[in-house]
Image (tube, rainbow, N blue to C red):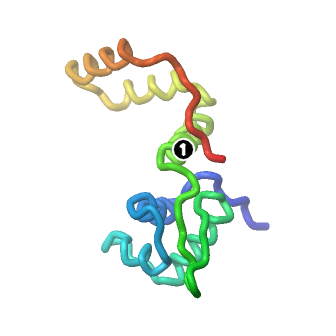
Amino acid sequence: MSRPPSKTLTEAEQRVMQALWRRGEASVREVTDDLPADHEVAYNTVLTILGILHKKKYVSFRREGRAHIYAPAVSQTAARNEALDHLVSRFFGGSKNAFAQYLLDEEQLDSAELEDLKALTRKAPPKRPKEKLK
């Protein structure tokens, strides 16, 4: 039995989405050419990844002649929020406070960084709804 597809982005999907977020829209060839040199993948692999991203509703496409032109269907912020919510839910029981405490405990921030964080929390706007995936 195959496992259900991940709602969040895999590393390869993330790289493809980065190319689309940079370009706005692109053909499979343009995405393939835009991937980092240290992560080059074949055209067919990019085509497969874009198909998966379309099923996950991360991208949309339109036909232009024989080519498909892909575009992000979600913003980078919405994808980031989804991934962070997944991480907090999976490893911290959904508690953002537990996640923040973990970061403070593990990162061993120096006093200047701690003061910066305190200043940020004092200036933080009231909680507003996050941009989510559709």
Residue 12, compared with residue 66, is above or below; it is: above
Q: Position of residue 125 (x, y in %)?
A: 44, 18
Q: Position of residue 57 (x, y in %)?
A: 65, 58
Residue situated in front as seen by the camera: 45 or 92: 45
View extreme (front): residue = 65
Amino acid type at mark 1: Ala
- Tell me where residue 131 sits by quadrant: top right
Q: In which quadrant will I find the N terminus?
A: bottom right
View extreme (top): residue = 122
**In the visual, does 116 lie left or right of 59?**
left
- Tell me where residue 37 sits by quadrant: bottom left
The residue that label 1 is drawn on is: 78
Q: Position of residue 117 (x, y in %)?
A: 32, 21
**In the visual, does 122 lie left or right of 53?**
left
Residue at x 61% of width, y 64% of height: 60
Find numbered disc 1 in the image and state the secondary structure of the residue it sits on: helix
Residue 71, compared with residue 46, is above or below; it is: above
**In the visual, does 62 lie left or right of 98?**
right
